[in-house]
Image (cartoon, rainbow, N blue to C red):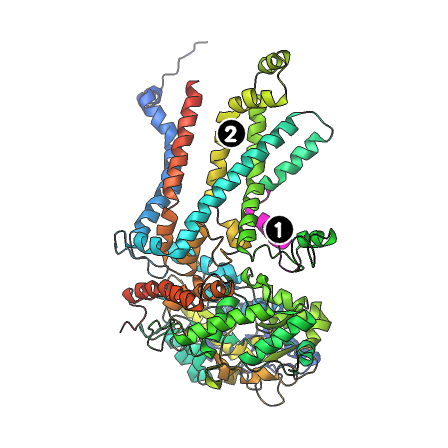
Amino acid sequence: MSTIAATPPPETRERRYLLDREGVLGPLMLLPAVVYIIALVGFPLGLAIAYSLSDVTIGDQGLDWVGFRNFVDVAKNGTFQKALRNTFLFTLASQVLVLTLANILALVLSSDFKGKRLVRFLILLPWTTPIALGAIGWLWLLDSVYSPIDWVLRQVNLLGPGTIFGPRGNMYWTAKADLAQLSVLLIHTWRTLPLATVILLAGLTAIPQDVKDAANVDGAGFWRQLIYIRIPLLLPIMAVATLFGMVFTFTDMTVVYVLTRGGPIDNTQVLASWAYFKGIEGGNLAQGAAIAMFLFPVLVGVAVLMLRMARRTETT
Amino acid sequence: MVTTAYFAGEADAQMEMEMRGRTPVWGTGISRRTLLKGTGAAALAAAMGPHLNVRATTFQTPTVNISGTELKILQWSHFVPTYDTWFDNFVKEWGAANGVTTTVDHINTADVPAAIAAEISAGQGHDLLEHIVPVAQYGPAMLDMTDVVQEVTNRHGPQLDLAKRNSFNPTTNTYYAFNHGYAPDPANFRKSLWEQAGFPNGPATFDELLEGGGKIMNEQGVQMGIGMSNEVDSNMAAQAMLWAFGGSVQDENENVVINSPETIAAVEYMARLFEAAMTPEVFGWNAASNNQLMIAGQASYILNSISAYRTAQGDQPDVAKDVFFGTPLVGPAGQERALAHGHAVFNYMIPKHSKFPDTAKEFLFHLVANYDQAADQSKLYNFPSFPSTVPNLTQEGGPLDNDPFGSEPANKLASLKTAEQWTTNLGWPGPANPAIGEVFGSFILPNMMARTARGEMSAADSVAQAEKDTLPIFEKWRAEGLIGGGQ
């Protein structure tokens, strides 16, 4: 029986040759990612920039250029200034809290104890809950009439006439500026803590055992090990956790929209929610886009930091 | 009895039904099945009690051929759930009778603006969009509904002026929406509390509100609830208070006039009222909060539609028995300016991207023709913009004097009979224009009240701040050519 070697037709050979070339295959493999980024990041960003420089409204989406007028008008508005301040306040304060609590939790969860898996599961739950549902849950918990937190405070005599939190029967969490801000801050912390904890837990387990053993042999106690070994070695991973948390908190409008709608007296308004109220509910799409564009420089900064860290990880 | 009016094409309609495989009831243009359903509904309505003398569904032959088309409706989830149940079936039956494929999507009223904005941007979506606040700012993307208003006026008589003012832009001379009804916004008060304070019929003036509300708070420990928060009820309450004190956001020519001694007096009054009769919760409310407070039995007085009361009838009957209704309070500007917004104004819009605008218009004709059912199924929440469609609603001895939904006493809703006289539009004395829409969307009015009530600013400074926030909004929309004024 004779065997005839199959000779591929010239076009197939040429195609194969082309695919063997790195200059062709590389871009081809990257193409889906590039299309994805252009379609879902680049195009909306470009549109937002165009909107912010125009007089577009919800009803009339024709683009008549007005230069930087929207940015000037927006910046003069008192509510915008509050929103800008609050956006930074909630982001930075929540991430300080998250970092502190995540370190503690990660240390606890890295040790062995009974029921560790259950505790890990419970700590992760807030991260798995859609933020809108979580915020509605908190809205009920902080309700001005039916708040269970207030009920507990009343039961332990911390709330009500002659008690530490004052004579009234409720705290009015979302009605007083300081309490409303604290509520938003704590919900952001509650939401981003699980992710940071998991990231730091992974970092802790990656610390070489011989380093820990050497510290133990040298007689280093808990605090010495924490300050001189764990924290320095965890710093890069802490930065990753912080950057993720910052992005999530900085861009979020759900918590504020569901819980306070920016009140009381716009004291919890953030850039994202103010952009929504102006742009969508008010119909002033151009100013809404201009407000949202103020998020851009910070997000670019965070993105650059993330990319640098990723590159450093690649080279080490 | 099924009443059916024919304007044109009876034979065509008859033939269409036969072609669709359903046996028409000759001379009516509707199938036996539909007829039986309609008769069944009428029998059910009769068995349930007097209601509104609700007639069985009236089907009219469409003025244009809409068979084979589609109708997709996006609207708010009604505060009275029975309305939605009825409405979905009502649409379905109309679609079946006319060979139209129908879809109804209900979403939370707070989410409607975002949904409409998204559909306008996408250039596709539903054919009919309903929102309960006038959104003139979306007007340029909507079809002019002048022809619908004219046709319905021809069929059912004149539309209420308040309905026109909530849906018509005089600058562009277009109806950006078709207003089919409104919900009055009366005062809701707890009679037993006000009786003890010496006002057995509730307060009639703002002075009485302050005096009685303060007394109830001090002696009976029950607060009142008029919001000063980033939500729609607070917007309406602040606006009504401005009117009663002689102020307003804009004049009839759409010029900003908010910074006036009258507005300052209203803001000062609100601060005194807060101090005397309210708790800080009013600064953190959402649109449902005053309802909740009333239903919980912890409010002496709120401004709301009857929906909170209807909920209380089911959930807290004892509280419901004690809830009574009053007309807008008289302030320093006198009876003429004792006004309230429509708590909800039912505006349907047809977006320019709609594939079947004629179908949407035909449905609106059908809805108005059967508005007695809408009023009935909403438990008297919906009041008609074309009063002839629910003729006995405000008549002596009608359902407001004898509530078919179990009020005790039965005439508890009687004060709503005059709602047409004291209900007006968003932005009165000007029209409900895009600038007023954005002022509401930015919560400028409740924040103006709250800053002074919280002691953060004097009334004069707070009003000046509100003016500073309002002027650029008006300038922006004036530049767009959507509002007048500017002199």
Mark 1 or 2, which is nearer the eye?
A: 2
Q: Position of residue A143 (x, y in %)?
A: 62, 57
Element assignment for label 2: helix
Report the side of B67 relative to A224 (left or right): left
Residue A135 part of the magenta segment? yes
Kindly report the secondary structure that dominates the magenta region of the rendered protein. helix
Q: Can residue A304 be seen at all in this image of the molecule?
A: yes
In magenta, the rendered stretch is: A129-146
Q: Position of residue A245 (x, y in %)?
A: 50, 38
Give the amino acid at mark 1: Gly
Between residues B410 and A271, which one lies in front from this camera angle?
Answer: A271
The disc at residue B435 is none
User: Is A249 located above or below residue B473 in the figure?
Assistant: above
Which residue has dot 2 on it? Answer: A238
- Pointer 1 residue: A137
Question: Which residue is drawn at the image coordinates 57% and 46% (left, top)?
Answer: A187
| Residue found farthest to the bottom | B396
Task: Tell me where residue B467 appears, x and y as whole percent.
Answer: 37, 66
Which residue shows up at 61% across the image and 50% down it? A138
* Residue A189: quadrant of the picture: top right
Asked if residue A264 lies left or right of residue B467, the reply is right
Q: Residue shown at 57%/16% (left/top)?
A: A208
Q: Residue furthest front?
A: A162
Measuring from the top left, give residue B85's x and y in whole percent. Answer: 61, 67
Residue B346 visible in the current orientation: no
Q: Amino acid at mark 2?
A: Met
- If you read the primary sequence from the N terminus, does the residue marked by circle 1 or circle 2 appear first? 1
